[in-house]
């Protein structure tokens, strides 16, 4: 039995799709089961509720061999601990109570690199909390997602510009969520691995700067796209104006400052961590249809 959290989310939905034809029994936890397609309902067991609720996650983990774990975003959280640690503690109790064998979680790069990296530091603390249960655990550690560019679709389409507080010329790794889902699928189906503190970096095939991304988007979309740097103070104000809590604003800003200081560049690139989807391919297959819609 494989349990999938966030089955309608960006990564969870792709992992679920990958697993549907595996022949393994699948159980999903969904706050709103109506968001699952009838095809999904017909092929998996659905537990309604939040996977941050002990009764829900405990029920879902009964007889489970493996769990895909992702703490959902909460832009109005009162603290970063509330997003990652408080939300995950009931699941940790359930993993122990139900004897779950393996957990695969989505986390971030940067362990031991920068002391205060905001959301990243909180995510790494979540990994430690899960590992402390004694369950076999693998954390998929990722840099920024290519898919985050979808938040900029309107400005790319209408103004030919995208914005970021990250440097324009510093090269960073970036990955497609499809590659995170693929790595999760492989681990969920493989019962041969063990160990509590394993990290699986997902680095994409190359490091790119924001200026590189602007050039690639221009070529793929057939129109000029430029990068506009946003000062940290302006970025902070914009997050607050969009309703993010004070803790969330601070967590995101600290994470971005850490990324600008090389947080994501510390992980050595290896054949294993170099995942296949290039930014150009992602633009062709995901961004371009969204911009043309």
Image (cartoon, helix red, strand yellow):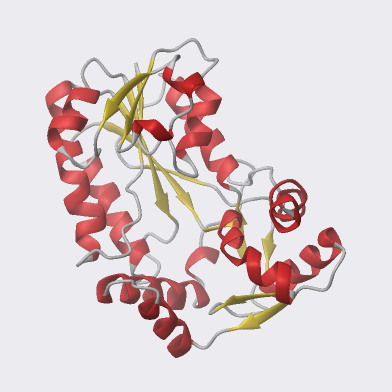
Q: Position of residue 65 (x, y in %)?
A: 31, 19
Residue 35 higher or lower than 97, as above or below: below
Quadrant hosting residue 238: bottom left
Quadrant hosting residue 3: top left
Q: Position of residue 239 (x, y in %)?
A: 40, 76
Q: Position of residue 210 (x, y in %)?
A: 67, 72
- Nearer to the camera, 135 or 7: 7
- Nearer to the camera, 66 or 115: 66
Residue 45 higher or lower than 33, as above or below: above
Q: Residue at x 36, y 79 (%)?
A: 240
Q: Position of residue 242 (x, y in %)?
A: 40, 74
- Nearer to the camera, 154 or 212: 154
Q: Quadrant of the N terminus?
A: top left
Residue 199 higher or lower than 21, as above or below: below
Q: Residue at x 32, y 55 (%)?
A: 124
- Nearer to the camera, 215 or 117: 215
Drawn side of residue 4 relative to residue 177, left or right: left
Residue 213 higher or lower than 94, as above or below: below
Q: Residue at x 24, y 15 (%)?
A: 63
């Amino acid at each position: 039995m494989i349990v999938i959290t966030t089955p309608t989310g960006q990564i969870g939905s792709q992992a679920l799709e990958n697993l549907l034809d595996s022949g393994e029994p699948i159980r999903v936890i969904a706050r709103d089961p109506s968001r699952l397609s009838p095809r999904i309902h017909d092929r998996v067991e659905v537990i309604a509720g939040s996977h941050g609720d002990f009764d829900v996650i405990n029920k879902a983990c009964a007889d489970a061999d493996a769990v895909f774990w992702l703490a959902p975003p909460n832009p109005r959280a009162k603290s970063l601990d509330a997003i990652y640690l408080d939300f995950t503690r009931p699941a940790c109790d359930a993993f122990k109570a139900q004897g779950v064998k393996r957990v695969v979680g989505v986390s971030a790069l940067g362990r031991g690199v920068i002391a205060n990296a905001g959301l990243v530091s909180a995510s790494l603390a979540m990994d430690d909390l899960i590992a402390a249960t004694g369950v076999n655990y693998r954390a998929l550690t990722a840099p920024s997602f290519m898919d985050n560019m979808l938040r900029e679709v309107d400005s790319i389409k209408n103004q030919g510009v995208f914005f970021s507080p990250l440097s324009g010329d510093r090269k960073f790794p970036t990955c497609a969520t499809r590659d995170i889902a693929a790595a999760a699928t492989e681990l969920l189906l493989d019962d041969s691995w063990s160990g509590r503190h394993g990290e699986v970096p997902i680095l994409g095939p190359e490091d790119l700067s924001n200026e590189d991304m602007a050039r690639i988007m221009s070529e793929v979309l057939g129109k000029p796209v430029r990068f506009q740097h946003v000062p940290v103070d302006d970025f902070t104000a914009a997050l607050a104006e969009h309703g993010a809590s004070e803790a969330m604003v601070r967590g995101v800003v600290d994470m971005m400052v850490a990324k600008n200081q090389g947080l994501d560049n510390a992980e050595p690139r290896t054949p294993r961590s170099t995942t296949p989807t290039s930014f150009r391919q992602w633009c062709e297959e995901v961004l371009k249809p969204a911009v043309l819609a």
